[in-house]
């Protein structure tokens, strides 16, 4: 009698592994983002030629797919804002009191001279929603047991990365390292998460460092100074009136 179990079992194992990887990525994103959040960040751009620091306040509404970012320091840039609603994004420049719509072609350009993109800051793409995930192995990163997951873009997803490797800590489902590869399989950048501590009622990595492999000696550090999650944010916060409101 011919038995087909050996043919079916790998499919079952694959489906189970894929579902586990998807669950891990979704839980990891949820921990970092929440349904809504607000916070204060310090950003430091480091290059061989200079170091530049900025501070900003942020408001996110992931369920409504909206965000607002306002620069508070240095003084010459204070009041500059970015508003994102759905897949559209606008930049308000306080010095000239002008609002510029950022076209889709610029979403993957550098955000304000940093090693992050407009897409990163606007959270236009979602790792959980725009990629399929597979659990590759278990590895120890920075002394913590982690799942290694590869994420590949879905056919209709408007994303730039050929694939992404993410190491997620097993003990709390928080990210440890992310590597971003282009369509040719070249490592373009990688992010290291650190300083895990309780902020806003949950333990999260409060320091994110993006290293730019395309530009030697370039990196951008994000430090979360304050955060609150799953709070009510008025709809008016994500409006053009708020975007163009002076301080």
Image (tube, rainbow, N blue to C red):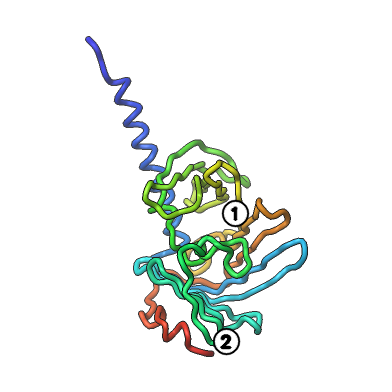
Q: Is residue 52 above or below residue 235?
A: above
Which residue in the protein does label 1 denote?
Answer: 191
The tag earlier along the polypeptide, 2 or 1, is: 2
Picture coordinates of residue 111, whole percent (x, y)? 57, 67
**Horizontal side, residue 193 vs residue 58: left or right:** right
Q: Relative to 181, say whether 16 is above or below.
A: above
Left or right placement of residue 24 versus residue 12 in this view: right
* Residue 202 in view, yes or no: yes
- In the image, residue 75 lies at what x, y percent? 65, 84
Mark number, residue 56: none
Q: Which residue is mark 2?
A: 96
Q: Is residue 144 above or below residue 91?
A: above
Q: Secondary structure at mark 1?
A: strand
Q: Are marks 2 and 1 in contact (CB under 8 Å)?
A: no
Instruction: Identify the residue at image location x=55%, y=47%.
Output: 182
Residue 187 lies, with reference to residue 101, above or below; the image says: above
């Amino acid at each position: 009698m011919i038995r087909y179990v050996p043919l079916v079992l790998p499919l079952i194992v694959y489906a189970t592994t894929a579902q586990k990887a998807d669950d891990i990525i979704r839980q990891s994103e949820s921990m970092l983002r929440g349904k809504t959040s607000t916070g204060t960040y310090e950003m430091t751009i480091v290059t061989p030629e200079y170091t530049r620091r900025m501070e900003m306040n942020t408001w996110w509404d992931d369920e409504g797919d909206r965000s607002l970012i306002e620069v508070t320091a240095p003084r010459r840039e204070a009041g500059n804002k970015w508003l994102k609603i759905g897949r559209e994004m606008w930049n308000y420049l306080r010095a000239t009191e002008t609002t510029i719509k950022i076209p889709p072609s610029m979403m993957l350009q550098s955000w304000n001279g940093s090693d992050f993109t407009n897409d990163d800051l606007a959270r236009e793409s979602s790792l959980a929603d725009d990629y399929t995930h597979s659990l590759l192995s278990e590895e120890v990163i920075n002394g913590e047991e982690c799942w290694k997951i590869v994420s590949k873009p879905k056919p209709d997803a408007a994303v730039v990365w050929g694939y992404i490797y993410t190491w997620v800590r097993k003990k709390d489902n928080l990210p440890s390292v992310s590597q971003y590869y282009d369509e040719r399989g070249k490592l373009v950048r990688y992010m290291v998460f650190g300083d895990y501590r309780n902020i806003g009622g949950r333990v999260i990595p409060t320091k994110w460092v993006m290293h730019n492999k395309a530009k030697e000696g370039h990196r951008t550090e994000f430090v979360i100074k304050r955060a609150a999650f799953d709070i009510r944010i008025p709809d008016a916060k994500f409006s053009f009136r708020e975007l163009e409101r002076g301080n």
